[in-house]
Image: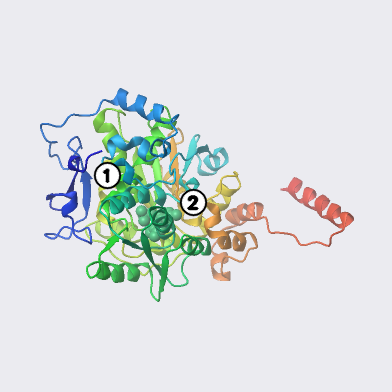
C-alpha cells in the first residue's frame, strides 16, 4: 500500500491535492467543498478521465485474492475492510493498520418484513454486527490508521454516539488519545457507556449534534487534533467496503436497490463510491439504486428536495427518538445528493410511529437493530406503496446499528410507553393492530408454577385468537 497512489479531489471545484496536504477541517480552502479519495484507476463522476498511466486492477484476480485472504490468520486479512485493501491503498505501511477485525457482517433474509413491505425478496446487511456494534467501525479502522501513520497523538469527533464509540475503541487499540463531543442527554446510554469504557475523554456539550460539530471544527484549527467525523474522506474509504462484501456474499449478483438511513449523510455516498468503483473495474455490470431515508423530525435533505429540488440545504431543528440520526444540518448533504442522482435512488422520510413499527418488525424476525436503522424498512414500505420499487425487485437494507445500542427505546416501545397520547392518536387502526401483535411487555408474576401455568394458558388463548 502506497500513499503516493492516492490523492484528494474536491467534490465541488475538482481541485486535487496530495493526501498529506489536506487542512485540519478536511475542506477545500478555495470553495469549502468536501474531498473524495481518488486513485489512478478511479472513475471520476463528472466525466473527467482517469490518468492515462492508470492500470486498472484485474477483476478476476481481485475476486480470487479477496476470497483467499478469508483463510489467512493475519489480522489485516481477517478484517472485512482491509481484505479489500487493493481498493483502498491509503496507508503506506500495513503495520500502521489499526483493526478490530471489523466488517465480515452477516446478510440475513427478512421474509416477514418483505411481506409487510409488499415485495418478494428482502435482505438485511447487518452492520450492527461490527466490533463496537455499528457500521462506523468500517470507516474508523481506515481513518484511524491514517491518523496513526501520520503520528497524531489526539483524535476527536462530534457524535450522536456511534462514531464516538467506534473512535474511542480504535484510538485505544492504537494507543492514541481521543476526545468525544456529544450532545448532552440526547444519545443512547449504550453508546455513552462505550466511549467511557474505551477510555475517551467524553465531553457532553449543552447543545445538539450540529452545535458539537461547530465547536469541534473551531478546536481542530487551534490544536493538533485529527478530526474523525465523516467529513474525513478516509472514513468513507472504509465505509465503501460493505458494498464489496455485499456483492461477494451475493455471488456478484447485483441487487436492484440498497436502502440506508440518512443522518450526517456520508454513508450513502460511501456505498455509492464502492459500487461505482466496482462497476468501473468491471467487477459488476451495473450499480444498484441507493435510497436514503431520514426521520421526519430530522429531514433536511428530504425537505430540500421537496422544496428546492436539492438546490440548497434547508437546515432543520432536529428532533427524533432515532437519536443516531438526530441531525439538522448534515455536512455531507451534497455528496448524498450526488449518490442519489448517480444511482437513481430516492430520499424518503419516516415518522416516529413508522420507525417504531419497522424496528419491532425487524426485531420479531430475530435480527433486531437500533431505531435509526429501522427507517430503512419504514422507507421501503413507502417506496413500494408509491410504485418506485416493484414486488420482484431485490432490495437490501443496510442495518447500521445493533439493537443493544438503545435498549431504552425497545423497552419503552414494548411497555407501550414510547409515544405521547397525541402521537398514539395519529396511528390508524390497522397499524394499531400491528403494534399490538408485536408488543411483548414483560410480565411480573409470583414465583408459583400454578400462577405461571395460568398465565401461559391465557397467553396461548390470546395468541390463538390473534
Ligand atoms: N445509522 C446509525 C446507527 C448512525 O449512528 C448514523 C450516524 C447513521 C445511521 C447515519 O449515517 O451520518 O452517514 O448519514 N451516526 C453518526 C454518529 C452521526 O455520530 O454516530 P450518516
The quadrant the N terminus occupies is top left
**Rendered location of residue 394, percent (x, y):** 43, 34
The residue under label 2 is 133
Residue at 39% of width from left, 63% of height from top? Answer: 159
Residues at circles 2 and 1 in contact by the CB criterion of under 8 Å: no
* Number of marks drawn: 2
Residue reaching furthest to the right: 450
Mark 1 falls on what kind of element?
loop
The residue under label 1 is 91
Residue 352 in view: yes
In the image, which disc is placed on residue 18?
none
Quarter of the image holding residue 412? bottom right
Examine the rendered structure and indicate whether residue 27 appears above or below residue 268. Answer: below
**Relative to 206, is 11 on the left or the right?**
left
Q: Residues within 10 Å of mark 2 (few under 14, many from 20)?
A: many
**Rendered location of residue 88, percent (x, y):** 28, 40
Choose the circle earlier in sequence order: 2 or 1. Answer: 1
**Which quadrant contains ligand 1?**
bottom left
Amino acid at each position: 500500500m502506497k500513499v503516493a497512489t492516492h490523492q484528494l479531489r474536491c467534490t465541488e471545484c475538482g481541485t486535487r491535492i496530495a493526501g498529506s496536504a489536506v487542512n485540519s477541517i478536511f475542506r477545500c480552502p478555495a470553495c469549502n467543498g468536501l474531498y473524495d479519495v481518488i486513485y489512478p484507476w478511479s472513475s471520476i463522476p463528472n466525466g473527467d478521465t482517469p490518468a492515462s498511466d492508470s492500470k486498472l486492477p484485474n477483476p478476476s484476480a481481485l475476486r480470487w485474492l479477496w476470497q483467499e485472504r478469508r483463510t489467512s490468520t493475519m489480522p489485516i486479512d481477517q478484517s472485512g475492510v482491509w481484505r479489500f485493501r487493493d481498493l483502498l491503498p491509503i496507508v503506506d505501511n500495513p503495520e500502521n493498520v489499526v483493526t478490530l477485525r471489523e466488517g465480515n457482517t452477516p446478510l440475513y433474509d427478512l421474509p416477514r418484513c418483505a411481506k409487510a413491505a409488499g415485495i418478494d425478496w428482502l435482505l438485511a446487511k447487518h452492520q450492527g454486527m461490527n466490533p463496537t456494534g455499528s457500521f462506523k467501525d468500517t470507516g474508523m479502522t481506515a481513518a484511524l490508521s491514517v491518523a496513526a501513520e501520520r503520528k497524531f497523538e489526539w483524535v476527536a469527533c462530534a457524535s450522536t454516539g456511534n462514531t464516538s464509540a467506534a473512535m474511542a475503541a480504535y484510538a485505544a487499540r492504537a494507543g492514541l488519545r481521543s476526545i468525544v463531543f456529544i450532545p448532552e442527554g440526547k444519545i443512547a446510554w449504550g453508546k455513552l457507556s462505550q466511549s467511557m469504557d474505551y477510555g475517551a475523554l467524553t465531553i457532553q456539550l449543552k447543545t445538539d449534534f450540529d452545535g458539537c460539530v461547530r465547536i469541534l471544527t473551531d478546536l481542530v484549527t487551534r490544536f493538533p487534533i485529527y478530526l474523525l467525523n465523516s467529513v474525513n474522506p478516509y472514513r468513507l474509504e472504509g465505509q465503501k467496503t460493505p458494498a464489496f462484501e455485499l456483492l461477494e456474499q451475493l455471488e456478484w449478483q447485483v441487487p436492484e436497490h440498497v436502502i440506508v438511513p440518512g443522518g450526517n449523510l456520508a454513508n450513502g455516498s460511501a456505498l455509492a463510491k464502492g459500487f461505482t468503483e466496482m462497476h468501473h473495474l468491471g467487477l459488476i455490470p451495473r450499480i444498484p439504486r441507493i435510497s436514503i431515508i431520514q426521520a421526519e423530525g430530522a429531514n433536511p435533505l428530504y425537505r430540500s428536495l421537496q422544496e428546492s429540488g436539492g438546490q440548497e440545504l434547508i437546515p432543520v431543528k432536529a428532533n427524533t427518538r432515532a437519536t443516531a440520526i438526530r441531525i439538522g444540518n448534515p455536512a455531507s448533504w451534497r455528496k448524498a445528493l450526488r449518490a442519489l442522482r448517480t444511482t437513481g435512488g430516492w430520499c424518503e422520510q419516516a415518522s416516529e410511529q413508522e420507525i417504531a413499527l419497522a424496528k419491532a418488525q425487524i426485531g420479531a424476525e430475530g435480527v433486531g437493530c437500533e431505531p435509526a436503522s429501522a427507517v430503512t424498512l419504514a422507507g421501503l414500505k413507502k417506496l413500494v406503496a408509491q410504485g418506485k420499487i416493484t414486488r420482484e425487485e431485490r432490495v437490501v437494507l443496510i442495518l447500521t446499528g445493533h439493537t443493544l445500542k438503545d435498549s431504552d427505546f425497545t423497552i419503552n416501545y414494548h411497555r407501550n410507553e414510547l409515544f405521547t397520547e397525541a402521537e398514539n392518536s395519529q396511528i390508524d387502526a390497522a397499524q394499531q393492530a400491528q403494534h399490538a401483535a408485536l408488543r411483548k411487555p414483560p410480565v411480573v408474576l409470583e414465583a408459583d408454577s400454578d400462577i405461571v401455568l395460568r398465565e401461559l394458558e391465557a397467553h396461548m388463548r390470546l395468541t390463538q385468537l390473534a
